[in-house]
Image: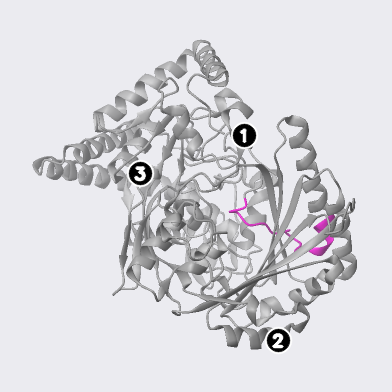
Amino acid sequence: MGISSTSPILSLFCVLITLFMIFHPSLSATTEGFLACLTRYDPNIQVYVLDDSSYLPILESGIRNPRFYPQFITPISGPRFIVTPSQDSHVQAAVICSNENHIELQARSNGHDYEGLSYRSDVPFVMVDMFQMHAVNVDVEEGSAWVEAGATLGEVYYNIANKSETYGFPAGICPTVGVGGHISGGGFGTLVRKYGLAADNILDARLVNANGEILDKNSMGEDLFWAIRGGGGGNFGVILAWKIKLVPVPKTVSVFTVCKNLEHGATQLVLKWQEIAPKLPDDLYIKLLLDRSQPVVVRSIYYTINATFVSLFLGGSPQLYDIMERLIPELGLRREDIQEMSWIQSVLYAAGFDPHAPLEALLDRNQTGRKQFFKSKSDYVNVPLTVVALEGIWKVFYDKKAEEPHMMWSPQGGAMDRISPAQIPYPHRKNLYQIEYMVWWDEHGIDAAERNINWIRTLYDYMEPYVTKNPRASYVNFRDLGLGQSKNGTASYEEAKAWGLKYFMGNFERLVQVKNKVDRGNFFRSEQSIPLINWSTHYFMSSNPYTRTASTGRGDGTTFERGEEVEAWSCETFERGKGEARGKQQGEQGAAAARRASKGEEAEARVAVARAAAAVRRARGSSSGCEDSKR
C-alpha cells in the first residue's frame, strides 16, 4: 500500500507543503536553523526533509493504520523533519535543536500509536524515528536485559529465546509493537495474570529529558521513574532503553483455541467465562474474542456471533485439561484441542503464526500483511454482564454499518489483583477484565470511515451502563482521541481531566505533579498529553484513593502524602531552586564538555557545550514569574 516516489499523491503532497512554506516564511527559517543545529552537533546524524526520496518510505514504514497515510491526512500533518538516530547523542541533539528552534518533537518506536500521534500533528514537528536503535542485550545470569526503545516485541522475545528456554517477558502478543511506547503505557499480554504488566517488570531505564540530558533510574529520581512506567508515551522524555526483568517460564506450555457461535451456546459460555476467567490459577490465561460471521448454512443471509476462547497455560496438557473439565466443562474442550510447545512457540502461536515456524518470523518488523483501516476504544468491567446486556451487544454487532466488528476481552485477576494501583501509573488493577473494541474496514473514503467509526461509538455508548464508572476507565495504550483532545498540547488541567482521569484515575494528579517538576516548558506534548498547571493559583484537593494527597490550605503549595510533608513545587520554590541549580548545571556541563573534548569525543562535547550555552541563554531571558514559557 506504499506510495511510489513518482505517484501523483506524492507530487500533490510536495506541492502543498511547498506552498504552505512559501506563505509561512518563518517555517523556512526554522528548517534552516534546525538543520544547522544538528550539523553542529554531528554532521553524520541522519535527517530527512520532504523532498528527500527516503522521507515518505521512512514515514510510511511505521504507519500501522492507513487512516493516517499521507493521502488521507492534510499535508501539514506529517513531520517537518525525520531524524533516525543510531546512538544516544543523536537523540540528545534532536531534542536540543528542537528546543532551540521552537519546534515540537515526537518519538516513534514502531508506529503503533492507535491515533498516530507519534508521526502526525497539526503543528510543525520533528519525528525521532528510533528504528535504528533496536539492540537487545540479554543477561541470563542476572535475569535481565537492556532493550533499546526501537526494538520490537518480536525482537525482544527472539533474543531471550536464543539465550534461554526458561525465561520470558510479560508483554503484548503483537511482534511488531515497539518497546519504547508499549512499556510507556503499561504493556498487556498473556502472562499478565502471572507476572503483571510489562511496566511492572522494569528494573531501570535511560531517557533524554527536555534539557537534552541522559538520565537513568538513579539520576531521574523516584517520581520520574514511576511516571514513565505506564504514564503514557511522549509526556516526560524520549525513552532510549529499558532494563527489563526476565520472568521464569516452564520448558513446556500448553495452548488451545476453541470457537463457538450462538447456535452452539456462545452466550452461556461468555457468561461462564466472566465468572471463571479472572479467578483461574495464575498460570492460566484465557482471553475471549468476539466477532461476527454468517453461520455455516447454505445461502444464509443471517449473521451469528462467534466467541473464540484462546488460552496459554504454563504447564502440561493433562493438567490444563483437568482444570478446564472441572471449571468449564460446557466449553467441550477435547484433549486433542490442546497443543504442547515451548514458551517461544506460544509467542508465535499467539501472534497468528504456525508455532513450528522459524523464530526469525518474529524479526519481521512489517509482518502485519494486509493493512486495514481501523478504530479502537476500550473499557473495563468490574461487574459481570447479564444475558440481556450480551444480547444487546449481539444486536449492535448485527448492524451492517460495521465492516468487521470485533471485541477482545482480556481477563485480569491473579498478579493484577495483588499489585497496588499506585505502584505505577496504570491504575486498573481490581477489575474483572479489559475490553478492546475494534472495527476494521477496507473501503476507502470519508463515508466509509464515518460509517464504521459511528458504529464503534454506538457500541461504546451502549456499553456505558455495564462498565466502570466515575470515571469510566480506558487503557492509554489503546489511545482514543474520542475521549477528548487539546489543540497543540495546551490543555488546561481541567480540560485534560477528560482523558487523564479515564487513563490514570487517581494517579493522574501525581503525573501532573511530575510533569510540572521535570518539563515545565511543556516541551513533550501532544493532543492527549499530561498538562502543566499554574502552581501559584492551583492546589490539589485530591480524590486519589491511592496516594491520599491533599492541600494544607496554607497557600504555600505544601501537601501531605501518607502523613509525610512533601514539596508541591510552588512558583516560589521552583524559581529559587532553578536559579540555584542553573549555576551548578552550567559548571558541570562545561567541565563535562572539556573532559569529552580531551578524550576526542567531539560529538558528545558539542552536545554538552550547546546545552551549557542554552542554559546561559535561558538564565538571561527567563522571567521571574511563574508563567510557563511560550515557545
Q: Is residue 188 visible?
A: no
Judge whether 269 appears above or below 59 on screen.
below
Q: Is residue 610 magenta?
A: no
**Residue at point 69%, 56% (across, down):** 378
Residue pictured at 36% horizontal, 57% vertical = 147
N-terminal-most mark, 3 or 1? 3
Residue 325: image tag: 2
Q: Please give the name of the residue rendered at 64% of the width and 46% of the height, measured from the top-left corner.
A: 496
Q: Earlier in the sequence, mark 2 or mark 1?
A: 2
Q: CA distance from mark 3 to mark 1?
A: 31 Å
Packing grade of label 1 (10 A; few <14, some 14-19, many >=20) is: few
The residue under label 1 is which amino acid type? Lys
Circles 2, 3 touching at the beta carbon (< 8 Å): no
Q: Residue at x 45, y 56 (%)?
A: 362
Q: Amino acid at mark 2?
A: Glu
Give the labeled residue for mark 1.
487
In the shown orientation, is residue 390 left or right of residue 584? right
Give the spatial CA distance, label 2 vs label 3: 48 Å
